């Protein structure tokens, strides 16, 4: 059963006011990566780049992956364009875009002027149980039940027929500011939906906000929730939380970013049990004024693999109105954050939009995508669900594009086996018409691969956009490697991705070649074994490059000295040696004076097998031991085990001198 969450509100401005769609932001974000200045977008490959056709219509204000809308084998996505309409009437539109070829599969227009249909969009799941995914679209300024009461459309795939039109209940509540599919809550075989009305006046409060659940047939399911106080704006974001308490039922959430629990507008997220409909008592709240926690949120899947689903929660002004923002990966089961990601510059709005990205790096743990629309051009970060480490990031074309206003996992749009994402930039383009882009996951099979050892110089050409060259080499634990890439012509845009021997992403580096033709970056290996460096063209259609690797051997891969004491019969001392394939080891073990004992010497290779030392080990007349030209045929970490035969603890002087092979030899065979 598929559930989707999408959040599309705009972060408060410097005065703490909520912006209506169309407002602009300031500047700034970056988490763990150094980004280039304003240039055409680079990073992961762009699968689709869809531009709006009308100036100031905010195409890309909201986006969501929706599954295979037309059953052609490719996942599709929906884009909101809330200010679209004749002569500035802003009726609004929403469009389902084909993941196969980027064409429009269906569009819907708002019912009347200034409805702003498309201010929120999401997958509705399958509300009519016909086997096709449906969509839900919000129009929070529709006046059917009063001025700005709001309205939501639920539309069928693949026909586009409007299944239900659901109206707000009272003027000014902006019903449809947020929408989400939440799965089959009542067990009738049809998926249900959740809708936010953050300006609803409930109880004796003003702008308390409310979220309401509706069955697949369009009727209301239970009563609405309004847990907060006046001006909390509960329902600014809504969605499925997954099963956060392990009771087998889908839970739901609503954000109240203006709640004052820990200071004015510190914000709060409320999570409700799918079993009892009651509030789950774990408190998730901002810890400082004006951070607006709960502005965005999303189900994250089981990040820590404890059997309970987790949440992503955005606080885009963390630390104060001008601060960079943060995102919590939060475990409801544990009642605490698993990790926190933060922006690094004032005004980033990092966390303005958050979503699950799917398993981008294919480590078995779902990853996350975060938008920071006020980072200059706008920026989107895809990070590991395991620990928050960056996987890749992308930026907009020009300052003020606001890329990252909306983000979503897109499924596998290009059917390459890797999870993709979609992001909106509603103020991008020459006429500020906006655009939405789908970015591909990590490159899969079909990349061109060559083998090398560190120190080789490789020259290659990326002949087309998104072509990948995968270069494999042996990395040595503790050794520092510098990668130097030289563009043969200006304008090269590439993404370098370094993978460890298990295929997990270690580090990514985005490179734009402008005036400088050569760029370097360094990495110190945490382990030995076969690594892979992927070079991907992401902007220039033809890119000639030269890659040179410089190896600075670490302590374990070069000459090392030690004094060891190994007393009979139980002491065993181990010394580690890192080696490339084809290396050799020389060693001297100087016996201490006035010692009658000796040493038993064993060399264990990276597979755990003992190395045959016959012909290489010599006992010297004074009792010392010499090893000469011992072949180290297996790449990785060797262990020299020394077991003492002396009765007293006396130290042997040990000198290990591995000789690594010359560069250009022992090229690793590629499949």
Image (tube, helix red, strand yellow):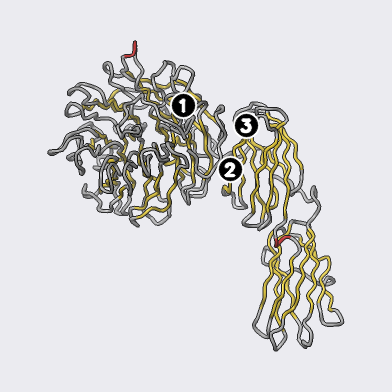
What residue is pinned by disc 2?
508
Mark on residue 527?
none
Rendered location of residue 331, percent (x, y): 36, 53
Which residue occupies 30% across, 19% down? 110
Q: Residue at the far right: name it.
A: 621
Q: CA–CA distance between discs 2 and 3? A: 14 Å
- Image spot of residue 578 (x, y percent): 70, 61
- Residue at x 74%, y 66% (from the top left corner): 560
Of residues 409 and 520, which is closer to you in this image?
A: 520
Front residue (pair 410, 424): 424
Q: Earlier in the sequence, mark 3 or mark 1?
A: 1
User: Which residue is more in the foreground, 193 or 89?
Assistant: 89
Q: Residue at x 51, y 48 (%)?
A: 389
Residue that label 3 marks: 493
- N-term mark: 2 or 1: 1
Percent x, y for residue 405?
41, 31
Q: Quadrant of residue 83?
A: top left
Q: Residue furthest left?
A: 204
From this viewpoint, is residue 314 visible? Answer: no
- The residue singled out by tag 1 in the image is 401
Question: In terms of secondary structure, where does tag 1 sit?
Answer: loop
Which badge, 2 or 3, comes first in the chain's sequence?
Answer: 3
């Amino acid at each position: 059963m598929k559930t989707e969450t999408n959040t599309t509100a705009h972060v408060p401005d410097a005065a703490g006011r909520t912006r209506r769609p169309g407002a602009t932001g300031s500047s700034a974000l970056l988490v763990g990566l150094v980004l280039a200045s304003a240039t055409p977008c680079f990073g992961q490959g762009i699968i689709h780049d869809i531009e709006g056709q009308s100036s100031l219509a905010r195409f890309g204000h909201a986006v969501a992956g929706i599954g295979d809308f037309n059953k052609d084998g490719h996942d599709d996505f929906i884009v909101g364009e809330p200010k679209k309409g004749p002569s500035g009437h802003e009726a609004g539109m929403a469009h389902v875009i084909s993941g196969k070829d980027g064409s429009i599969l269906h569009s819907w227009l708002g019912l009347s002027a200034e409805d702003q249909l498309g201010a929120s969009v999401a997958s509705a799941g399958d509300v009519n149980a016909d086997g096709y995914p449906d969509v839900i679209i919000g129009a929070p300024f529709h006046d059917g039940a009063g001025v700005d009461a709001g309205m939501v459309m639920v539309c069928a795939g693949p026909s586009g027929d409007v299944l239900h039109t659901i109206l707000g209940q009272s003027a000014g509540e902006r019903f449809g500011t947020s929408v989400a599919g939440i799965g089959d809550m009542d067990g009738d075989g049809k998926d249900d939906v959740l809708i936010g009305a953050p300006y609803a006046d409930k109880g004796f409060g003003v702008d308390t906000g409310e979220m309401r659940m509706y069955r697949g047939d369009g009727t209301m399911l239970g009563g609405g929730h309004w847990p907060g106080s006046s001006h909390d704006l509960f329902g600014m974001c809504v969605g499925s939380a997954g099963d956060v308490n392990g009771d087998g039922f889908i839970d739901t959430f609503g954000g109240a970013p203006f709640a004052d629990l820990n200071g004015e507008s510190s914000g709060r997220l409320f999570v409700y049990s799918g079993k009892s409909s009651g509030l789950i008592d774990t408190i998730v709240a901002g810890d400082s004024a004006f951070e607006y926690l709960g502005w965005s949120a999303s189900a994250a899947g089981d990040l820590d693999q404890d059997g309970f689903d987790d949440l992503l929660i955005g606080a885009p002004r963390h630390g104060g109105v001008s601060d960079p923002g943060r995102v919590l990966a939060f475990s409801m089961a544990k009642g605490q954050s698993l990790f926190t990601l933060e922006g690094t510059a004032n005004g980033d709005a990092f966390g303005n939009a958050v979503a699950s990205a799917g398993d981008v790096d294919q480590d078995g743990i779902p990853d996350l995508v975060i938008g920071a629309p006020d980072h200059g051009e706008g920026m989107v970060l895809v990070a590991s669900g395991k620990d928050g480490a960056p996987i890749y990031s992308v930026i907009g074309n020009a300052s003020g594009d606001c890329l990252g206003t909306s983000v979503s996992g897109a499924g596998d749009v290009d059917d390459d086996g890797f999870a993709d994402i979609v992001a909106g930039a509603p103020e991008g383009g020459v006429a500020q018409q906006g655009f939405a882009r789908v970015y591909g996951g990590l490159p899969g099979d079909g990349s061109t691969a060559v083998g090398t050892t560190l120190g080789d110089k490789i020259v290659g050409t990326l002949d087309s956009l998104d072509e990948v060259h995968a270069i494999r080499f042996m990395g040595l634990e503790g050794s520092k490697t510098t990668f130097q890439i030289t563009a043969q012509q200006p304008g090269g845009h590439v993404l370098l991705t370094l993978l460890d021997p298990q295929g997990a992403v270690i580090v990514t580096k985005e490179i734009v070649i402008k005036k400088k033709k050569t760029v370097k970056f360094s990495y110190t290996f945490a382990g030995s074994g076969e690594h892979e460096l992927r070079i991907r063209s992401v902007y220039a259609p033809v890119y000639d490059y030269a890659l040179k690797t410089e190896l600075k051997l670490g302590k374990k891969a070069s000459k090392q000295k030690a004094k060891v004491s190994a007393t009979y019969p139980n002491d065993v001392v181990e010394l580690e040696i890192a080696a490339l394939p084809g290396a050799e080891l020389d060693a001297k073990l100087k016996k201490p004076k006035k010692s009658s004992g000796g040493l038993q010497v064993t060399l264990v290779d990276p597979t755990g097998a003992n190395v045959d030392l016959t012909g290489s080990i010599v006992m010297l007349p004074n009792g010392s031991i010499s090893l000469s030209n011992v072949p180290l045929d297996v790449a990785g970490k060797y262990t020299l085990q020394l077991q003492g035969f002396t009765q007293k603890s006396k130290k042997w002087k040990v000198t290990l001198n591995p000789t690594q092979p010359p560069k250009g030899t022992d090229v690793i065979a590629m499949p």
